[in-house]
Amino acid sequence: MTVLNREILHIVSKNLLSGILFLIAFSISARGVYQTEQDFLAETFSNNVPKSQVIWMKGDVRQSVDDILGHSYVGLRIRYWRNEQRSAWVLEEIGKTEPITFGVVISNNKIEKVKVLEFRESRGSEIRYPAFTQQFNEAQLTNNQLDRHIDGISGATLSVEAMTVVVKLALYLDKLTSQ
Amino acid sequence: MNRRMRSLHRSMGAVVALFVLMLAITGVFLNHSSEWKLDKQYVTWDWLLQHYGIANVQPDVVYLLDQNVISQFGSQIFVNTNPVTHSERLVLGGIVLDDLIVLATDDALLLLNLEGEFIERMGAAANVPPMIQNIGLFHGEPVIQTLDGLWRSDFLLDQWERVSLQGVGWSLLQSMPDSMEAELAEYFHGKGVTVEQLLLDVHNGRILGQYGVWLLDILGILLLVLSLTGLWIWARRVH
């Protein structure tokens, strides 16, 4: 093996190792709690969090919730926080295999803010970036569908679907509880 | 040469005979496994289940609450034999409160109804104090022990007040009833090993793992040599 070949091999192996380490570090960093539920609520209601309320999943409500999710909701009630026309929801939906915890704030039946509070998958955490979540701002529900198209993220399709479904669910429940 | 070949043939024949018997018998049974419903019959010998690695189903925790057996296997929580919800955190205790079963993990309360349906997870956002260590009842009211002291609530569980109490009936770990253990084992591993599977694994040597496969390979080679030596002897006799 010539000196040049040896050097090329050295550079390739070094870069390969760096690449692998970067990928491992990236996949580890994707998982985690980005904001606790309490901090999300405190931020949403400026440290004046209203008393929580619950909506029971039964009859038509359960049917609609299951239709929106595309599967049966696990649980008999959902907790939420409301202050006049603003409501906050902490909801979970499976991305690929693990549940993702979302925080959704709705104001006057329109999305004010969507956040990923906890991400447990190894891939797809790009949905937490404001560049993606801002697509949902001001979104409303029409016939249980969002009034706009949401651009996906390559490699994060299931996480995008999970967030879209949770936003629809929150809008539906907000409408129901604000009546 | 001929005598040596006969001697080799005889020795190998004796060694191989037992295996051939075993292969012949299991082969005949496997040929008729559907007609004889061997795929519907199960073997549940402890040593065999252990050999297949499906004998022990050990729950992490078990609590008996209002005739219900609450158990946790990894992140899966069961009410009797029904999987009802997941919890990444260990269930530290449980109580029955009116028509609710309340399970406590270190950071939340998991609510089920008496039919075993999951209602809701109440965490710190729902005002449940963090760092829970146990849950109990004091004169019918829920009490939790946290690293930060004792807290008492009412049936709504969303307002907690710090208290100092004696005589709380704390939740205690129980052991899994035998009948339930068997049913849960069935949930995880089915009814056991089918007779067909057992016969197949004996037939192809996989009952002994990778060594069994090698053993059958050696047997195959021995059979090959036996056939060749047999043909050699036969050919010599004809001539």
Image (cartoon, rainbow, N blue to C red):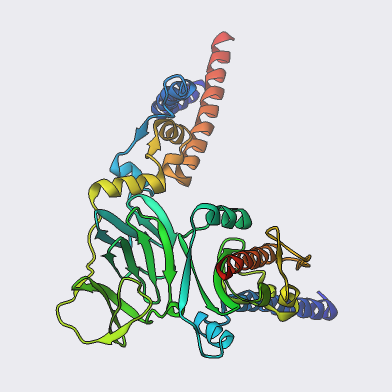
Q: Residue at x 42, y 62 (%)?
A: B119
For residue B122, say whether it is visible. yes
Q: Residue at x 28, y 61 (%)?
A: B62
Task: Give the farthest residue toward the top.
Answer: B238
Q: Residue at x 54, y 73 (%)?
A: A90
Give the total of numbered labels: 0
x then y, percent, for residue A22: 68, 79
As drawn, is B197 to the left or to the right of A14? left
x then y, percent, for residue B177: 23, 51
User: Is residue A59 positioned above or below B74 on the image?
Assistant: above
For residue B75, say whether it is visible. no
As drawn, is A23 to the left or to the right of B64? right
x then y, percent, for residue A70: 62, 54
Quadrant of the rendering where the C terminus of chain A is positioned: bottom right
User: Is residue B27 positioned above or below A41 on the image?
Assistant: above
User: Is residue B160 positioned above or below B173 on the image?
Assistant: below
Quadrant of the rendering where the N terminus of chain A is positioned: bottom right
